[in-house]
């Protein structure tokens, strides 16, 4: 194949190490560290060029001191040393590590002796917070232990500038996007405000990796990131945050790129998704832009067995005989014994693997009398199980419900949001949704679309939390009055018909009037007095946005500070009537092809230290002024053929 080994990048990929997880539990306190150490040992054994982490290195936003000490000790122990780093860092570190006190890649720092550089984005557990908006990774970065990248400082427009690496003929671009609130990122993608910058120089020669830390599976309408949002020029996406290990490269929904989801390296929650074998990945990329992912099963992960039992499936009589004898307990006890035996099969023989297993049995009961004190029950297994008091999870057995009876029709909702809705009025979205419903049972019965839309608009734009209940109350009163005015003998079915007729009448007679009545009801002075006054209207909207800032990435720089209204994006995606967009996103470049020069003066902006390097072959950063970037987005990206997995495409 003509590939020389020296050209091939070898990268150890892991995410969600959750260091410090369960550190107060005497049984499990070391689990996360044992496995992190195993990962670092693997990196050394497999002679990787670098380690790439996908966020949530730490479990706590403010890791405890013992946690920090152990983490720093492990990183120093395994990633520092004399073996040379064999790739060149050719992007501008000032751009890649913009937020950093010392924007330099650690292995090029003349004061440090790094053998295996670690690159990491932050996750939702270890994101920036508090004074100065620092995060735990920043401490590691300032100590030279890791290269923390992918942090977004502008939350209205994200431009991702890749880390560019070269090893022989192999060119690697790594796009990092640290964790952002899913809803916010969803909105930014929808309004085309997430841009990936691509090197203009031999643009198609790069193997493009993206690492992000977001919800991957759909949890709600907008609190996840669909794969289709990501730029199709990407070759491999490393998905952090989801803890289930899906290490085999899988083609994205639109066949644009491959995705791997390494999952967490420690069991953080007792769910089925965490009870599968945990792996990290050895990623190899060669100069022909081919890649190979080898799953490396982790040997130190505590055995975890998950199971379900549905009491309704058991023919025997499960009614308790008296306070002491509950046949369900006996049934469950024997089930747990079987699970413990199964857990023994998960012993790997690794000397550092904890052997006491985690057990989770979900018990679906039909009748409350079948329940028992799970904590007391757990005492029987104290010496055999790592989590005796939380083995059992009771769940009420639910008869299958017709999903159409209640709730939201996901398909109809998706149809509404399939298009770019950033310029659409929120009330139009409400009408579109109901127009797209297939199931007539889900149509409105009492309210009209117009009335509901007014309430939703008030809810969204004026932060009027009671708008919807208010409009329901208003329509109910109105309907009641109308029904009573009919002055006739009522049978129940008739009333239903009358309500429907009245609604139809309101809709057809004068839709405008219906809307006006709704607005009048919402603006009823009695109500308004109890709510925030109208003069606060704009601040209301802004503070709604600010909520994201508090939990998420840092506030924007002072020029766009909290007080200044004009410069703030007013959240067009949330339906602010689209009338005045001039205030929004003024900093956004007008053309999607705007070029970004990496370094203005042509020299690396790292202060020259003047110290001699200690005789060690240090790769030198290339002249960065030659690199220009092209903005790319999913609309404008040009895309070559899919660069498939190498060596053997489907076995691993
Ligand atoms: Mn996580």
Image: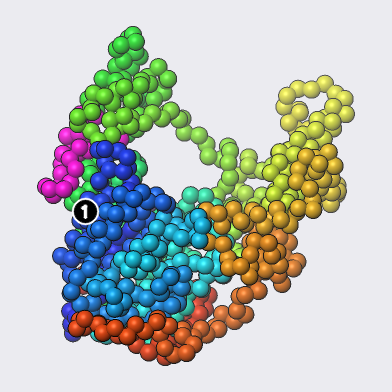
The residue sitting at 73% across, 61% down in the picture is: 577
Residue 377 picture quarter: top left
Which residue is at the front of the view, 59 or 472? 59
Magenta stretch: includes residue 347? yes
Q: Residue at x 52, y 85 (%)?
A: 595
Secondary structure of the residue carrying numbered label 1: loop
**Residue 86 left/right relative to 22:** left
Residue drawn at 46 percent across, 69 percent down: 99
Q: Against 72, is 176 above or below?
A: below
Q: Nearer the viewer, residue 139 or 508?
A: 139
Residue 324 painted magenta: no
Image: magenta residue range: 336-361
Q: Report which residue position mark 1 lands on.
A: 298
The location of residue 550, given as percent across then percent down, is 55, 54
Tell me the quarter of the picture where residue 501 sits.
Answer: top right
Residue 521 on image: x %, y %: 82, 42
Q: Is residue 242 visible?
A: no
Quadrant containing the C terminus is bottom left
Above or below, comparing residue 455 to residue 115 in the picture: above
């Amino acid at each position: 194949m003509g590939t020389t080994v020296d050209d091939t990048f070898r990268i150890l990929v892991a995410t969600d190490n959750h260091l410090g997880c369960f550190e107060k539990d005497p049984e499990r306190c070391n689990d996360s560290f044992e496995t992190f150490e195993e990962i670092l040992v693997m990196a050394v054994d497999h002679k990787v060029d670098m380690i790439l982490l996908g966020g949530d290195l730490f479990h706590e936003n403010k890791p405890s001191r013992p946690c920090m000490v152990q983490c720093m000790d492990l990183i120093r122990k395994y990633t520092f040393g004399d073996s040379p780093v064999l790739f060149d860092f050719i992007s501008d570190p000032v751009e890649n590590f913009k937020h950093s006190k010392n924007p330099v890649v650690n292995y090029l720092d003349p004061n440090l002796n790094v053998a295996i550089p670690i690159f990491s984005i932050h996750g939702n557990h270890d994101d920036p917070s508090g004074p100065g908006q620092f995060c735990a990774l920043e401490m590691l970065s300032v100590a030279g232990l890791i290269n923390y990248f992918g942090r977004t400082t502008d939350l209205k427009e994200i431009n991702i500038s890749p880390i560019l690496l070269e090893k022989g003929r192999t060119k690697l671009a790594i796009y990092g996007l640290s964790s952002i609130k899913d809803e916010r990122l969803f909105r930014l993608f929808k309004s085309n405000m997430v841009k990936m910058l691509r090197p203009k120089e031999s643009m198609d020669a790069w193997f493009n990796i993206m690492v992000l830390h977001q919800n991957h599976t759909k949890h709600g309408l907008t609190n996840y990131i669909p794969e289709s949002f990501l730029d199709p020029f990407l070759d491999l996406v490393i998905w952090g945050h989801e803890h289930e290990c899906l290490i085999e490269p899988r083609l994205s929904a639109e066949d644009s790129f491959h995705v791997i989801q390494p999952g967490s390296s420690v069991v953080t929650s007792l769910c089925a998704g965490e009870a599968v074998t945990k792996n990290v990945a050895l990623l190899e990329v060669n100069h022909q832009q081919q890649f190979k992912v080898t799953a490396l099963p982790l040997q130190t992960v505590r055995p975890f067995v998950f199971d379900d039992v549905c009491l309704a499936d058991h023919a025997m009589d499960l009614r308790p005989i008296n306070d002491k004898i509950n046949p369900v307990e006996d049934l469950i006890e024997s089930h747990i014994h079987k699970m413990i035996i199964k857990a023994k099969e998960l012993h790997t023989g690794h000397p550092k693997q904890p052997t006491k297993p985690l057990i989770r049995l979900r018990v679906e009961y039909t009748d409350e009398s079948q329940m028992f004190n799970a904590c007391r029950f757990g005492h029987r297994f104290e010496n055999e199980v790592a989590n005796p008091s939380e083995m059992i999870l009771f769940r009420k057995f639910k008869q299958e419900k017709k999903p159409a009876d209640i709730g939201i029709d996901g398909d109809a909702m998706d149809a509404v949001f399939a298009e770019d809705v950033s310029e659409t009025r929120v009330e139009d979205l409400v009408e579109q949704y109901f127009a797209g419903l297939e199931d007539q049972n889900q149509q409105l019965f009492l309210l009209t679309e117009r009335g509901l839309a007014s309430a939703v608009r008030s809810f969204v734009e004026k932060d009027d939390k009671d708008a919807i209940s208010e409009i329901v109350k208003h329509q109910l009163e109105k309907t009641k009055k109308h029904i009573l005015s009919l002055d006739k003998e009522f049978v129940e079915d008739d009333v239903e018909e009358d309500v429907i007729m009245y609604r139809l009448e309101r809709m057809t007679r004068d839709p405008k009037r219906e809307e006006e009545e709704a607005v009048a009801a919402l603006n009823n002075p009695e109500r308004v007095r109890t709510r925030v006054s109208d003069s606060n209207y704009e601040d209301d909207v802004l503070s709604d946005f600010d909520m994201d800032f508090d939990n998420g990435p840092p506030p924007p720089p002072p020029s766009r500070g909290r007080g200044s209204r004009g410069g703030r994006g007013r959240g067009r995606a949330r339906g602010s009537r689209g009338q005045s967009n001039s205030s929004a996103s003024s900093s956004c470049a007008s053309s999607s092809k705007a070029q970004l020069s990496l370094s203005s003066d042509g020299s690396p902006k790292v202060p020259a230290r003047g110290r001699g390097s200690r005789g060690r072959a240090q790769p030198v950063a290339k002249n960065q002024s030659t690199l220009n970037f092209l903005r790319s987005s999913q609309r404008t990206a040009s895309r070559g053929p899919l660069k498939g997995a190498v060596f053997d495409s489907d076995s691993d």
